[in-house]
Image (spheres, grey):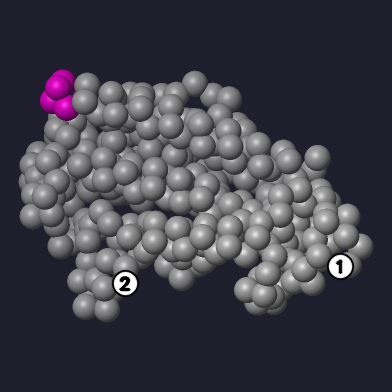
């Protein structure tokens, strides 16, 4: 395994941990308050209800692989999953006089999670290498609400901005080319045949592309699945990108979010499609930068 190369004093790493807690808490605190009051938000709840990472896990700060935490406060971390205390020879080689020194146990993580790491590498590297498709216009959400009078809609407490008939009309006159299986699998049954592509779990590794909003939201998923190997600051960068993408995704959806203060991106119009593509292009560039960072960390595990 790689030798830890960065040593943080207790003061240094506790400051980073506090900063992370404040940054993550800005999102987890309102969500937990809504959950306690049994209220819901169609945009801001998504990352906590769709993805498997819990608010408490997001709040927990990790330094990432190759970092040593020192000082008495680090002792607790030795009992955390995928952490270990440094032995005396390791501490001496790094010039650490303190007996309390803890680091992420990369070897243990890879022993139990190597398959997940390799799958993440395949998805991230393949997606990064493909050209972006900027012509989807968020129609996956419309396909999920297709024929709603027969099927109902996923967000039953929201109204359709154009009504059921208007939503169906947009779907039927549009070219739909969704590449993301985890969006496609929620299509209304009558809409699956309208998609020009048939994404599946089996072809996911060859179909995902960097223009896809959902593939870019999933950067958060890949990041937290690699915790604690990744620094929590990078996980939060992915989380906040996903948060902003979700907001745009729902603005372009068929739902009326005016009660939540969201102006629609009217993708049923040429102006709305142009606006969607402009924002999508910006998210693509940002996601490719984060994707490259994730790949770099994965590549570094075997260096």
Q: Looking at the image, is 276 positioned above or below residue 215?
A: above
State the SS at label 2. helix
As for residue 272 lying within the magenta part, the answer is yes
Please say whether residue 49 is visible from this viewpoint. no
**x, y (%) of residue 23?**
39, 57
Residue ID for mark 2: 32
For the residue pair 283 and 59, the one nearer the viewer reads as 59
| Segment tinted magenta in the rendering | 269-273
On-image quarter of the C terminus: top right
As for residue 6 lying within the magenta part, the answer is no
Q: Are marks 2 and 1 in contact (CB under 8 Å)?
A: no
Residue at image x 34%, y 48%?
Answer: 243
Please say whether residue 42 is visible from this viewpoint. yes
Q: Nearer the viewer, mark 2 or mark 1?
A: 1
**x, y (%) of residue 290?**
51, 37
With 15 as the anchor, is 109 left or right in this view? right
Residue at image x 43%, y 27%?
Answer: 285
Label 1: how many residues lie within 10 Å, few (<14), some (14-19) or many (20+)?
few
The CA span between labels 2 and 1 is 40 Å
For the residue pair 85 and 153, the one nearer the viewer reads as 85
For the residue pair 273 and 193, the one nearer the viewer reads as 273
Q: Looking at the image, is 287 positioned above or below residue 273?
A: below
**x, y (%) of residue 214?**
40, 42
Q: Main secondary structure of the magenta part?
A: helix
With 249 as the anchor, is 148 left or right in this view? left
Label number found at residue 87: 1
Q: Looking at the image, is 76 positioned above or below residue 292?
A: below
Image quadrant in which you'd find residue 44: bottom left
**x, y (%) of residue 280?**
33, 29
């Amino acid at each position: 395994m790689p030798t830890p190369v960065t040593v943080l004093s207790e003061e240094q790493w506790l400051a980073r941990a506090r900063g992370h807690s404040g940054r993550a808490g800005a999102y987890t605190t309102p969500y937990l308050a809504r959950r306690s009051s049994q209220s819901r938000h169609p945009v801001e709840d998504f990352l906590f209800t769709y993805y498997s990472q819990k608010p408490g896990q997001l709040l927990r700060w990790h330094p990432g692989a190759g970092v040593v935490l020192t000082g008495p406060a680090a002792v607790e971390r030795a009992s955390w999953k995928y952490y270990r205390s440094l032995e005396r020879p390791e501490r001496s080689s790094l010039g650490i006089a303190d007996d309390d020194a803890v680091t992420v146990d990369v070897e243990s993580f890879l022993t139990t999670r190597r398959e997940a790491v390799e799958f993440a590498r395949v998805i991230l590297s393949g997606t990064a290498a493909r050209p972006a498709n900027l012509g989807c216009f968020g129609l996956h959400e419309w396909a999920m609400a297709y024929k709603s009078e027969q099927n109902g809609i996923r967000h039953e407490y929201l109204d359709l901005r154009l009504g059921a008939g208007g939503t169906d009309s947009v779907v039927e006159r549009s070219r739909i080319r969704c590449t993301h299986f985890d969006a496609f699998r929620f299509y209304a049954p009558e809409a699956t045949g309208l998609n020009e592509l048939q994404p599946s779990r089996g072809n996911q590794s060859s179909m995902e592309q960097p223009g896809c909003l959902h593939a870019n939201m999933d950067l958060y998923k890949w990041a937290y699945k690699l915790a604690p190997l990744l620094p929590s600051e990078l996980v939060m960068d992915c989380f906040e990108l996903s948060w902003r993408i979700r907001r745009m995704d729902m603005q372009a959806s068929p739902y009326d979010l005016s009660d939540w203060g969201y102006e629609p991106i009217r993708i049923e119009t040429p102006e709305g499609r142009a606006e969607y593509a402009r924002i999508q292009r910006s998210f693509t560039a940002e996601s490719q930068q984060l994707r490259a960072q994730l790949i770099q960390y994965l590549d570094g595990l075997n260096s």
